[in-house]
Image (cartoon, rainbow, N blue to C red):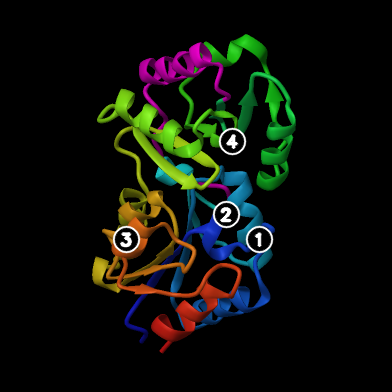
Amino acid sequence: MPPYRLLALDLDGSMLTPDNRIAPATGEAILAAAAQGIRITIATGRMFSSAAVFASRLGLDIPLITYNGALVRTSGSGETLHHTPMPTGPAREVLHYFRERRWPIYSFIDDRLYVEEITDEVRTYGSIAFTEPIAIGGALYHPERAPTKLLAPAESVPGGMNHLSGSVKARFDGRLMVAISTPRYLDICHPQVNKGRALQFVAHRYGIPPREIAAIGDSENDIAMFRKAGLRIAMGNAREQVKDAADHVTSSNRDDGMAHAIRSYILP
């Protein structure tokens, strides 16, 4: 039996190449692990419907950790196993914080993407996530139901991600989960949400202890997942703090890094 029975895989910057696809070598390595009896889960900041596209392309019916762990749902049947939306009050406060600064922000409710208006930036995100954005104007800032996640694109913020991340964390630290999911996007969720908690939830369902979990990721929101795994592998393109939290560093997502990691450290 393989020493690792559960494999948690990040999508953007890890499983996916920069052009938003699964490289053949990576897909083959993941399926080789599944064939060995290793359970697979995808752990991503993406919405469920977007993550499910890649599970389908791999031909896997698996639990998907989406929205950084706020929603865990099976890719085949669509059964919701766990859902923790944002608290409504702080969510509205974040939305107004962004509106005051005229910074764009996206809201996810019922696995749908809501925006104030359709811009080129919104179209780009929609194409990456395989979803059709819904423009609702000023109603975006007065949600009747709590969002599962809010997402902020850094490119439209003066000072970019460093300023965006620092500003939002300073304002909402301790009240919400704020983490960089990709170099372009900042994720905001319920304060108790992170990939680590969701991974622990999935592992418990299978009766798998932390020492038998392997995780591969590249960004700030993957560090919590690393803390719940017995083997932590950072991509070569990972942020330095992610590499510091890992046991091994593989090559980049441009160079089949996930495939190399699975074949080098996980497959028996």
The reply to whether discs 1 and 2 touch (Cβ–Cβ < 8 Å) is yes
- Earlier in the chain: of badge 1 and badge 3, it is 1
Looking at the rendered structure, the kind of residue marked 4 is Glu
Task: Name the mark on residue 75.
Answer: 2
Looking at the rendered structure, the kind of residue marked 2 is Ser
Identify the image quadrant of the C terminus.
Answer: bottom left
Occupied quadrant, residue 93: top left
How far apart are labels 4 and 2 at the CA level?
A: 31 Å
- On the image, the x and y values in percent for residue 38 come to 44, 76
- Earlier in the chain: of badge 1 and badge 4, it is 1
Query: Pointer 4: what residue?
Result: 155
- Earlier in the chain: of badge 1 and badge 2, it is 1
How far apart are labels 3 and 4 at the CA level?
A: 28 Å
For mark 2, does the 10 Å Cα neighbourhood hold few (<14), some (14 to 19), or many (20 or more) residues? many
How far apart are labels 1 and 4 at the CA level?
A: 31 Å
How far apart are labels 3 and 2 at the CA level?
A: 23 Å
The reply to whether discs 1 and 3 touch (Cβ–Cβ < 8 Å) is no
- On the image, the x and y values in percent for residue 222 come to 39, 54
Query: Pointer 3: what residue?
Result: 226
Side (left or right) of 28 relative to 166: right
Occupied quadrant, residue 184: top right
Query: Pointer 1: what residue?
Result: 56
Question: 63 above or below 40?
Answer: above
Looking at the rendered structure, the kind of residue marked 1 is Ser
Identify the image quadrant of the N terminus.
Answer: bottom left
User: From which residue to which does the magenta span run?
Assistant: 75-104
Residue at 56% x, 16% y: name it.
Answer: 102
Task: Give SS at disc 3.
Answer: helix
